[in-house]
Amino acid sequence: MRIKNTNDRYGIVAVTFHWLMALLVIGLLCVGLYMTSLKISAQKLQLYGWHKEFGLLVLFLVIIRLSWRFININPTLPSSIPAWQRFIAHAVQWALLGFMIAMPITGWLVTSAAGLAPSFFGLFVLPTLVAPDDHLRHVFADMHEWIAYGLIATICAHVGAALKHHFIDKDDVLRRMLP
Amino acid sequence: MKVRVISQSIIVAALFCLSAPVFAAPTWKIIPADSSLTFTATQNNAPITGSFKKFTGNIQFDPADLKSSRVEIDVDIASVTAGDSQVADTLKTKDWFNVTVFPHAVFKATDFVKTGDKKYEAKGVLTIRAKTIPMVLVFNLDDYAANKAHATGSTTLQRTQFGVGQGDWSKTDAIKDDVRVDFIISATK
């Protein structure tokens, strides 16, 4: 497999980013939904700690991934796909990237408003973005939650479309992203 | 004659006793607006700070008379603040400070040592949740004038020694054992 993307498939860097981030994002969504349902405990706090660290990792990775995307060509979709489907496919991809930036930033705002600076895997501590504020914490937490629901819906659309191409249209759209 | 000597010595002794408080370290009153008691703990590898908004003190201190100096600080645990209200509310619960059962923390020191220019150590005992543990505070006496004194200092304690964090909370992965305490005391006579 090529390192860079070609006209008909993704290169190893893009493929690695795609599946690594899929794993991280889905894991974060599951942990996020679970941890917020718990009553306050040491375990809950520990999960929040991991959630923040891996969330910041996603923010860091998505920036590198976007940079890689900008200096690369993207494989073109098969000519059989109608224009409106191309438009939606790209809109969904950009929405996913947007959500992957919006999620960690709103999460960082939640923990900032709670007066809890996030650590990046014990390597360094990030600054808080706002002063502790109960009202703001609720506002940011609601935003974080609703963006998460939006992200889940968008992931479903993305996965659904990929599977439709693979199993119904029997084209190479999904295969282009497989290792 | 003998009676006179005895009575004279009694008078001298009585005078000495009466005058003794004059030689004792002066009593200082804390100025709450210019004083603070904050703490910094570590949660998920990042610092979290909080403070106790209310504390009172019984301070007799004179750098020239450390022997008769004594300090007693009484902290109103219910006045704790940290991060947002969620954190403060948790700290008041049974597993943490258990504020309904242990509403006060007290630091008492009678042993003061000068360690350098304006630098002192106060050796005493700290009581939290009815557990009393020896504790040394280091402080800087930034200002000591006739009617105003200003000291800043700190110490580091281990929260689990006092049982602050019961059950699962006594594990120190998510919340470290060490808690740094910083204080600023502004006082007037």
Image (cartoon, rainbow, N blue to C red):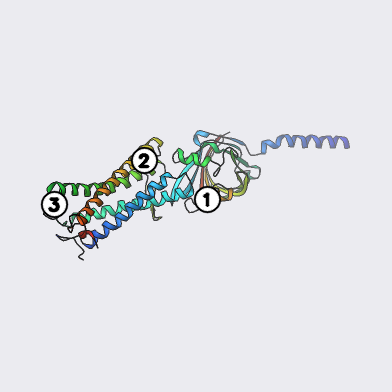
Residue assigned mark 1 = B168
Q: Are marks 2 and 3 on the same chain?
A: yes
> Which residue is depicted at the point 81% across and 35% down?
B8
How many badges with numbers are in the image? 3
Q: CA distance from mark 1 to mark 2?
A: 26 Å
For disc 3, the chain is: A
Amino acid at pointer 2:
Ala
Q: CA distance from mark 2 to mark 3?
A: 39 Å
> Which residue is depicted at the point 51% across and 48% down?
B180
Looking at the image, is B52 positioned above or below residue A16? above
Residue assigned mark 3 = A81
Mark 1 or 3, which is nearer the eye?
Answer: 3
Quadrant into which the C terminus of chain B falls: top right
Residue A28 visible somewhere in the drawing = yes
Name the quadrant containing residue B3.
Answer: top right
Residue assigned mark 2 = A141
- Under tag 2, what secondary structure? helix
Residue A128 lies left or right of residue A163; in this view the side is right
Badge 2 local density, few (<14 within 10 Å), some, or many (20+)?
A: some
Quadrant into which the N terminus of chain B falls: top right
Q: In this rendered view, identify the residue nearer to me: B177 or A13.
A: A13
Looking at the image, is B28 positioned above or below residue A73? above
Badge 1 local density, few (<14 within 10 Å), some, or many (20+)?
A: few
Q: In this rendered view, identify the residue nearer to me: A23 or B111.
A: A23
Residue furthest out toward the bottom: A1
Q: In this rendered view, identify the residue nearer to me: B123 or A50.
A: A50
Q: CA distance from mark 1 to mark 3?
A: 56 Å
Badge 3 local density, few (<14 within 10 Å), some, or many (20+)?
A: few
Residue B99 lies left or right of residue A95; in this view the side is right
Which circle's residue, 2 or 3, is located before the other in the chain? 3
Amino acid at pointer 1:
Asp
Indicate the position of residue B26 as horizontal and vertical percent values: 62, 37
